[in-house]
Image (cartoon, rainbow, N blue to C red):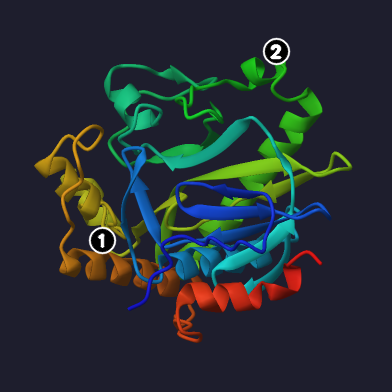
Amino acid sequence: MRILEKAEIPELPNPYFGKVRDNYDLPDGTRIIISSDRISAFDRILACIPWKGQVLTQTARYWFEETADICPNHVLAYPDPNVVVGKRLDILPVEVIVRGYLAGTTGTSILPRYKRGEREMYGHTLPEGLRDNQALPHPIITPTSKAFDGGHDEPLTALQIVEEGLLTQAQWDEVSAHALDLFARGQQLAAERGLILCDTKYEFGTDADGKILLADEIHTPDSSRYWLADGYQEAFETGSRPPSFDKDFIRAWVAERCDPYTDPIPEIPAEMIEKTSRVYIDAYEAITGQTFTPDESGATTLDRVRANLAPYFPG
């Protein structure tokens, strides 16, 4: 099982290496985005998961193609299973999270805040009497500020977004309408696969002409929470967590053995790495309805990626 740990390609200009994606900006205004196999948590890299990069790129490709009639996106080409070439965008400073259920565990999630007694959040009023993981009366947008400098995202309301000048009213109207329409399409197609799309995040950006495009990824296992429809009702009635594509056992294993924010990360067992890889592959097949075929061409994954990107080398 091969991995792409880091896509360092000296022939490509203007590199930027993120937590899981490696990027290159070309002089013609396009960006090459390479999904590595790194898995990130606690603001650091924990391990590399075989085929994770291919799974995320191809899952996003499925959704970009299935939603292109709703919202234009940044995609220009897919020269490699791990790579998307897209328009370089100015990313809007608002992360758009759409939630269909009262769920989540993080500080920006609505379930912990609801259980603390809050009913007003993100500019919405939630009704009394909701239970953990219950469907909301209708999907809501819970936007946050996008921390580009490594800071923490902060909750926002639609009014704050406009008043603080993060987006114009027209931009927010367009982005929020796109987000709700994309989420509705995602829930519809997920239901046809026996899945529940619980919540997800979207990123939007503007191109050189000021047009708003969908960027980054869409409805992948990393950007979205999926539940398995078969088993949801029983879990809801018993108050247990609905069955899902559980990728968090690596995170839990690390957290049990050290302070993951300050201590060295212990070596993660090979069987856990392989199990996580299988979860990603299973998620791809369940979400898209397609069989996952790992691309094993080339001496290594990096060699294959580099060869497929040779037409983009300047000069």
Please indicate whether residue 100 sits to the left or right of residue 249 in the image. Answer: right
Residue 51 coordinates in the image, percent (x, y): 40, 71
Considering depth in this image, is 102 or 200 the residue closer to the camera?
200
Q: CA distance from mark 1 to mark 2?
A: 43 Å
Q: Could you tell me if the residues under marks 1 and 2 are in contact, i.e. CB atoms within 8 Å?
A: no
Mark 1 — residue?
Answer: 231
Crowding at dot 2, Cα within 10 Å, few <14 / some 14-19 / many 20+, comes out as few
Q: Which residue is mark 2?
A: 163
Residue 173 placement (x, y as % from top left): 74, 32
Which of pointers 1 and 2 lies earlier in the amino acid sequence?
A: 2
Give the residue displayed 17% in from the left and 41% down from the top. 255
Query: Which residue is painted at 41% across and 25% down in the image?
Result: 127
> Which structural element holds mark 2?
helix
Q: How many marks?
A: 2
Whether residue 240 is visible here, answered yes or no, is no
Q: Secondary structure at mark 1?
A: loop
Percent position (x, y) of residue 207?
81, 44
Q: Name, please, the residue furthest toward the top.
A: 163
* Near-viewer residue (94 or 126): 94
Please give the label number shown on residue 64. Answer: none
The amino acid marked with disc number 2 is Glu
Depicted 141 relative to depicted 58: above or below: above
Q: Is residue 127 left or right of residue 260?
A: right
- Quadrant in the picture for residue 69: bottom right
* Residue at (68% x, 13% y) in the render: 164
Given residues 290 and 33, the one toward you in this image is 33
Q: Is residue 270 visible?
A: yes
The image quadrant where one finds the C terminus is: bottom right
| Vertical placement of residue 261 versus 84, above or below | above
